Amino acid sequence: QELLRVMRTIDDRIVHELNTTIPTASFVGKVDPGQTCKELYESLMDAHTSRERIIKNCISQTSAVVKTLKEEREKAHEDAALLKQLRKEQTKV
């Protein structure tokens, strides 16, 4: 969760990023707005791709834990702690 929070920084600060990327009238000649916008777009896409990969990996790992817990629950129907752990993992997914 902490890693996802850090990875969302660019999205959370998008207004600031846009304001610093797009030059004001006094800087138009010094900065290529097309290039800076392209770089911002690429960094956003990289961040989204990376975040998506991490989320899918987390879902995959948690789903495997849920599957294991379900199999264990089939063997021990009355185990309240196991059921609680299963519900916790299902909520996480």
Image (spheres, rainbow, N blue to C red):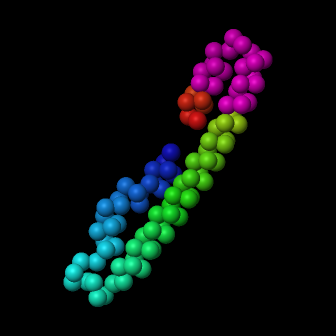
Residue 25 in magenta stretch:
no
At 70% from the left edge and 37% from the top edge, which residue is drawn? 64
Query: Relative to residue 90, is residue 10 depicted above or below?
Result: below
Answer left or right for 8 relative to 33: right
Number of residue marks: 0
> Residue 36 at what x, y percent from top left?
39, 77
Answer left or right for 83 relative to 38: right
The C terminus lies in which quarter of the figure? top right
Residue 35: image quadrant is: bottom left
Query: Relative to residue 65, is residue 24 depicted above or below?
Result: below
Residue 21: image quadrant is: bottom left
At 61% from the left edge and 44% from the top edge, which residue is drawn? 58
> Residue 5 at what x, y percent from top left?
45, 50
Query: Relative to residue 76, is residue 48 depicted above or below?
Result: below
Q: Which residue is at the far top?
A: 78
Q: Which residue is at the far right?
A: 75
In the depicted view, which residue is nearer to us: 82 or 52? 52
Residue 86 in magenta stretch:
yes
Residue 90: image quadrant is: top right
At 28% from the left edge and 77% from the top edge, which residue is drawn? 23
Q: Main secondary structure of the magenta part?
A: helix
Q: Which residue is at the far left?
A: 26
Answer left or right for 31 relative to 24: right
**In the image, which residues are magenta?**
66-87
At 34% from the left edge and 66% from the top edge, which residue is drawn? 17
Q: Which residue is at the far bottom?
A: 29
> Residue 80 at what x, y percent from top left?
63, 15
